[in-house]
Amino acid sequence: MNRLSLASSLILLGIAGCAPMVVMPGSMSIPVQLQAEAIIASDGHRLLLTRYDAPGDPKAVIIALHGFNDYARHFDLAAPYWAERGIATFAYDQRGFGRGTDAGLWADSTTMIQDARQVTSALRERYPHTRIILLGVSMGGAVAVSAAQSGIEADGLVLVAPALWGWRVMNPFFQISLWLSAHLAPDWTLTGRGLGRKPSDNVPFLRRMGRDPFVIKQTRVDAVYGLTGLMDRALGAPEKINLTTLILFGDDDQIVPESPVRELAEKITAPCRFTYVLGGYHMLLVDLAAKRSWDEIATFALGHDLPVGPGCAMGERPEG
């Protein structure tokens, strides 16, 4: 028993000494600033911005949140298409990703959510009479859902293959493995190679991502741990979402599980539509069938053919 107690104590000391790294926000408190190539958050953090302007005054504005390990250039195909239809897109690199100085390190989830809320408020002030849509892709969907649950100055919410594989729906074996890994070896990196999962059928775009130095290729395990907490948080209170919502999910998504996305949709009480994208993988905005998603999002952003509530109209999964 003495040896067992000693071993247990050593393990606990090891865990205490190797906590997951979280980059906390700064102590400043300033007004959010929209600059040409960056958004300055309230703590002074610089969020690199990619803008896709529409000709003249925009008919709608999309605030686009990218997915895990990606950055704002994810919208290079979709946003110009929307711009041709009068929709401006503001996409920024979220903390811990892309061109930021802290890329690869997980940021505080609350701060990431606050960034989305503050950017939306700043754009509402700039475009007081224009439809503003908060759009989240994969991890960005979890951020967008969480922001919408706490109240946000937008006219609609779009979730594109939202990542919602949180603790409450995760296999207990994965829960234990991830927790131990994040606390014993937080800087251990994962690549995702060998999993046999296909994120998209757009091979040229995937190759471009592989060459892009701002797309993270080796992921710290404590970043995965942080992501899991964020996804779990997004599942917490879908009934608090009061925005008209559009949810898109590929019928061949091999990256995120479908069941928690449907669970979220079924609990939303605001007007909502859940749509399967035929021939869609996880990266719906870059897939070869991406135009289907672009068109549906553009229609929604412009305020046409909106879902009526209460509750979410659940689409039928395509056969075959």
Image (cartoon, rainbow, N blue to C red):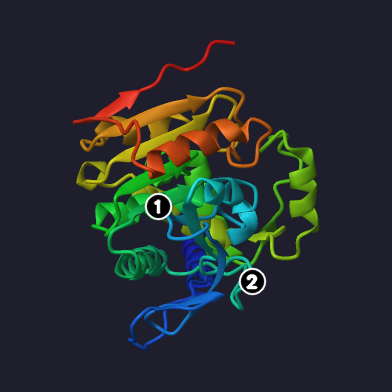
- Mark 2 / mark 1, whichever is N-terminal: 1
Answer few, some or many: residues within 10 Å of disc 1's Cα (few below 14, many 20 plus, some between 14 and 19). Answer: many
Q: Position of residue 224 (x, y in %)?
A: 55, 55
For the point 78% across and 39% down, the residue is: 203
For the point 72% across and 57% down, the residue is: 217
The CA span between labels 2 and 1 is: 27 Å
In the picture, the quarter occupied by the C terminus is top right
Name the residue that disc number 1 marks. 60
Q: Are marks 2 and 1 in contact (CB under 8 Å)?
A: no
Q: Is residue 186 visible?
A: yes
Name the foreground residue: 185 vs 138: 138
Left or right: residue 19 compared with residue 208: left
Report the disc number at residue 99: 2
Name the foreground residue: 18 vs 236: 236
Name the quadrant containing residue 286.
Answer: top right
Q: Residue furthest front?
A: 56
Name which residue type carries label 2: Arg
Q: Position of residue 122 (x, y in %)?
A: 34, 71
In the rendered image, the vertical position of residue 6 relative to residue 318, given as above or below? below
Q: Residue furthest bottom?
A: 28
For the point 61% across and 70% down, the residue is: 103
State the SS at label 1.
strand
Q: Nearer the viewer, mark 2 or mark 1?
A: 1
State the SS at label 2.
loop
Q: Position of residue 193 (x, y in %)?
A: 75, 45
In the rendered image, the vertical position of residue 12 relative to residue 80, given as above or below? below
Left or right: residue 11 compared with residue 43: right
In the rendered image, the vertical position of residue 317 relative to residue 97, given as above or below? above
Name which residue type carries label 1: Ala
